Image (cartoon, rainbow, N blue to C red):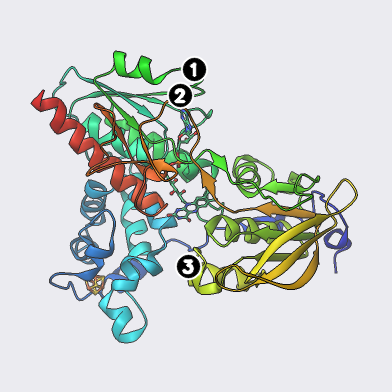
Amino acid sequence: MDPRALKEGIVSGRLDADALSAGFADLHAPLTDHEALVAADRCYFCHDAPCITACPTDIDIPLFIRQIATGTPEAAAKTILTQNIMGGMCARVCPTETLCEQACVREKAEGEPVQIGRLQRYATDTLMAQGVHPFSRAASTGKRIAVVGAGPAGLSCAHRLAMHGHDVVVFDARPKAGGLNEYGIAAYKSTEDFAAREVDWLLQIGGIEIRNNMALGRDVTMADLQSEYDAVFLGMGLGGVNALTAPGADKEGVLDAVDFIADLRQTTDLGSLPVGRDVVVIGGGMTAVDAAVQSKLLGALNVTIVYRRGRDRMNASVWEQELAAAKGVRIITNASPVAVHGNGAVREIEFEFTDDDLNPTEQTFRLAADQVFKAIGQTLTGDDLPDLDGRKIAVTGPGRTSVKGVWAGGDCAAGGEDLTVTAVAEGRDAAEDIHAALMRA
Ligand SMILES: Cc1cc2nc3c(=O)[nH]c(=O)nc-3n(C[C@H](O)[C@H](O)[C@H](O)COP(=O)(O)OP(=O)(O)OC[C@H]3O[C@@H](n4cnc5c(N)ncnc54)[C@H](O)[C@@H]3O)c2cc1C
Ligand code: SF4
C-alpha cells in the first residue's frame, strides 16, 4: 500500500493526481446521441404520467422524452427549463431514485426506470452547449424586486421575475453566486465548473443584477430592502450548523462537514486538501454521505459514517447509501456520540448504541479518528426575519410570509424537502405570486 495513505493525522497529498481525477470524475457520464435515443425509446409516454406528479417542478417528462426521441433535444430542453430553469443542475443532483424514476411505471414493472435524469441532462447540456437562452423578457414593468440569496431558490425566483419584465437585484453574502450548487453539491456531481456556467447562462435573460459579498443583516437591512424595492424574496438557505454537544467536541480536527465540502468545491488543486487517515462522519443525510465519500476519494484510509437512528430513517437515499458503501465507506447506525477523546487534537470518538427512539443502551464503542465531520443539520440564521414556523420562516401558499411584501422559499422556508429541485420550484412559484401581486397593485 502507498505509505502516504497510512500516514496518521490530517495531511494533504494522500493520492496522486491521476487517482484524484479518476475519483472525482463525473458520477454519471453524459449520454451520447445514440444512448439518448435508446433510453428515450423505453418511455411509454404514459397518459397521466406518474413521473410528472413525482417531480417537484412538474416537468412534462413524457413530452421532453418524446422530443428527444424525435431528434429535437433543444425543444426538449425548453420543455424542461420552462418549468425548472436549473434543469441542468437538477439533472445532475436530483435524487431521481426517490422522485420521478421511483414513480416511473417501468421501475414498478421491471425494476429499471426510464433514465429520466440522464435524459434531462442530455437535453439541457445540448442547448447550453449552443449558448442558447430560449426565454426573453416581457416589456419592463418598472418594478424592482430584491432577492436575498443567489442559490437555487433565489436565482429561480429572479429569473422568473426578470422574464415578467421586473428588475431584480440579488444580494448574496458569498463571493460567488450559486448557493450550495457552487459551495455544497458533491464535486463529482457538478464537474467542469457547471454551477458557475449555469448561473452565467441563466443571467442571459437580462434584468438581474447580482451583488456579491452583500449580506442581509450586515451590509443591508430588511428595512432598506422594504423601502427601496417593491417586493422582497428571501432565499438565504440555512447558513448555520447544529453544534455537537458531546464533551470534547471543540478538539482540533472536529470540523463542520459543510465547510470541508465548500473548501473542496472551491480548490483548484484537490491534492493540496488535507484529509485524515481515520475519518468519522456524524450524520445521516446527503451532507454526511458527501463528506464521507469525498474524504475517501481524497485518500482517507478508513471512513465511517455514524448515524443515531436506523438506516431506514437516514435522509440519504438508499442509492446514496449504496454509493457510499461502493466507495468503501462503512455505515454504523443506532449510535450517538458521547465523547471526543484526544489531547488537544481528536484521536478517538466514543459512541453509545441507541434504540430507534434514541434511548441509550449503555453499550459503548470507540472509533479511531484524526478527523471528525459534523453533518448533523443546518439552521436558519439572522435577525429581523418574518415569523418562524419551528426553525424556519413560516410561509403560506406560494411563499407568502407574515410580512406584507416579503416572500420566502427554498431551504430557509418551512415545509418542503431540502432539495435543489424544491428550492427551484418554490422560487419560481413565489415569483409568480409576486408578479400577480405587483400587477394587481
Ligand atoms: C453538502 C450538501 C449536499 C447536498 N447535495 C444535494 C444533492 O445532491 N441533491 C439535492 O437535490 N440537494 C442537495 N443538497 C440540498 C440543496 O443543496 C439545497 O436544498 C439547496 O441548495 C437549497 O437552495 P436555497 O437556494 O434555498 O439555499 P442555498 O443553496 O443555501 O443558497 C442560499 C444563498 O443565500 C446566501 N445567503 C445566506 N445568508 C445570507 C444573507 N444573510 N444575506 C445574503 N445572502 C445570504 C448564501 O450565500 C447562498 O448563496 C445538498 C446540501 C448540502 C449542504
Ligand atoms: S412514468 Fe416512465 S414510462 Fe411513463 S411517461 Fe414517465 S418516464 Fe415515461
Amino acid type of the residue that numbered disc 2 sits on in the rendered structure: Leu
Amino acid type of the residue that numbered disc 3 sits on in the rendered structure: Ser
Q: Secondary structure at mark 1?
A: loop
Q: Is mark 1 in CB contact (under 8 Å) with mark 3? A: no
Q: Earlier in the sequence, mark 3 or mark 2?
A: 2
Q: Which residue is mark 3?
A: 317
**Residue occupying the far bottom of the picture:** 110
Query: Is label 3 or label 2 in front?
Result: 2
Q: Is residue 119 above or below residue 433?
A: below
Q: Which residue is mark 2?
A: 216
Answer with left or right where residue 427 lies relative to residue 312.
left
Question: Disc 1 to disc 3, how far (Cα)?
Answer: 38 Å
Nearest the viewer among 10 and 91 is: 10
Q: Is mark 1 in CB contact (under 8 Å) with mark 2? A: yes
Nearest the viewer among 83 and 416 is: 416
- Tell me if I can see residue 34 in this picture: no
Amino acid type of the residue that numbered disc 1 sits on in the rendered structure: Asp
Counting from the top left corner in percent of width and height, residue 378 is at 53, 46
- Tell me if I can see residue 315 in this picture: yes
**Number of callouts in the render?**
3
Counting from the top left corner in percent of width and height, residue 92 is at 43, 56
Q: Which residue is mark 1?
A: 219
Task: Tell me what residue is drawn at x 20 percent, y 59 percent.
Answer: 60
Quarter of the image where the C terminus is located: top left
Q: Secondary structure at mark 3?
A: loop
Answer with left or right where residue 314 lies relative to residue 8.
left
Task: Tell me what residue is drawn at x 21 percent, y 24 percent.
Answer: 166
Mark 1 Cβ and ligand 1 under 8 Å apart: yes
**Residue occupying the far left of the picture:** 440
Quarter of the image where the N terminus is located: bottom right
Nearest the viewer among 100 and 435 is: 435
Mark 2 Cβ and ligand 1 under 8 Å apart: yes
